[in-house]
Image (cartoon, rainbow, N blue to C red):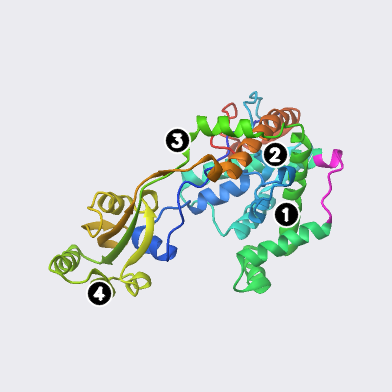
Amino acid sequence: MKGTNSATVVEREDPVPVGTTTKGRPDAARATAGARGPGPYRKLVAALGRRSRVSPRGRARPVAAVLALVVVLGGLAQLVVHELTTLPAGVVLQVGDRSVSEADFRQRIDLLAGLYGAQPPQDPAGRERFERDAAQAVAASMVLDDVARERNVVVPEPVAQQALDAIIAQKFAQGGRQAFAQALGSLGVSEADVLGEIRRQLTTARLFDQVTAPAPPVTDPDLAQAYGERRDRFVVPEQRHLRNLVVDSREKAQQALTQVQGGADFAAVATQASMDRSTAQAGGDLGTLSREQVEGPIADAAFTAAPNGGLYGPVQGQYGWNVGQVLEVAPPRQLTLDQVRDPLRGQLDDERRLALWRPWLTDQLRGADITYADPYRPADPDAAPAGVGP
C-alpha cells in the first residue's frame, strides 16, 4: 500500500454509566456552569473514524451509531510504510485505479457534517489533521466496500430507508423532513447521498458481523473476572446539588454573595440578578452534577465549598462571574456487578470481536493499493491507532 493509514481520532464513551444525568435542566447547567462535552471537530472526526454499533447476538444498538464511518473500526494496526506516489492535481487519493477528487472528498465531508451537525476545525493545524484522518477513512471505506461486494454482503433498500427515517425523526424532531432537506441543501448534498452513506455503514456492519462471528460468547464467570479487574471504573463520583447565579462583573457577584450571607434567600437573589434566565426562574437551580460536568474554576469552588448550604464565589467562568450554593452532597458510591452486568457484557463482547476484526482489517488494507496526495497522507503511517474502540 502506498502511503499508509494513521491513527484516526475517535470519540469514545465509557462502557458503563459512572454517573447520573443532570437533574432538571441540562441546558441550564451547560449555559451557567459550563458543562463539558465533545467539540464539533471531535464529533465529525468520530463520524469519519468510528464503527457502527452492530447488534452482536441480538443485542440492541443505538440507531445513530449506524452512521459512524465504520472503516477504521477498532483501528488499523501498524502498517509498513511504502513509497509515496505523486497523484494528479485535484486528486486526494487513489485505491487501485479509482481516484477520489477534491470535489468528491469535500462532498463526503459535507454529507457527514449534515448528518452530525458539526464542521471541521478552522485553525490550520486542526484542519490539516482532520483532512488527513478523513482521507484515511475514505480510503479504508473503499477497501471495505470492495470486500463486501466480493462476499455478496448487501443491505436491502427498505432497510436503509428505515434507518434514514429513524435518523430524521431523531435529529430533526421539530421540523421533520423539511428541516432535514433544508439542512442538506445548505451543504449541497442530497437525500440520495445520505441514503447511500447509511447503506455503506449498514453493509460494513454486516461485514463486521461475518468476520467476528467466531468470537466466543461472554459467560458469567467472564463477567465476574472482568468486574473484579475493572472495579475502580464502576464508581459513581461525588455529586452536588447546586444553585448558581452568573453576572457580568466581580462587583455584582460580590454584592449578590453579600446579600445571601446577610440572610437573603439565594433563590430570590438568583431570580433577580442572574444573567442566565433559563435557570434564574428556578432560583439558579442547576440540579445534581458531578465535578466533571461543571466548568473547571466553578467546579473547584463548588466542590470544595461546605455541604448543606455552603456558598462559593465570586469565581469567574466562561460566561461571567459566578456565585453559588451547595444544597446537598451525594458521596461516591460503588456500582455492583448486577448494576453493570449488561453494559459490561457488551464491552467484553466488543473487545473480543475487535480482537478478530483488527488483524483482519489490517490484512485487507495491506493488500490494497492505496496512494495519498501529499497534503492528505496520514501523518504517521506506522503508528498504532489511538483511542479507537467500539
Q: CA distance from mark 3 to mark 4?
A: 41 Å
Q: Nearer the viewer, mark 2 or mark 1?
A: 1
Say which residue label 3 marks.
232
Chain part drawn in magenta: 148-156
Q: Amino acid at mark 1?
A: Ile
Left or right: 354 as drawn, with respect to 294: right
- Numbered label tally: 4
Q: CA distance from mark 2 to mark 1?
A: 16 Å
* Label 1 or label 3, whichever comes before in sequence order: 1
Say which residue label 2 marks.
140
Q: Residue at 71% of width from left, 59% of height from top?
A: 194
Percent of width and height locating residue 160:
77, 57
Q: Nearer the viewer, mark 3 or mark 4?
A: 3
The answer to whether the residues at label 1 and label 4 have Cβ atoms under 8 Å apart is no
* Label 4 neighbour load within 10 Å: few <14, some 14-19, many 20+: some
Q: Secondary structure at mark 2?
A: helix
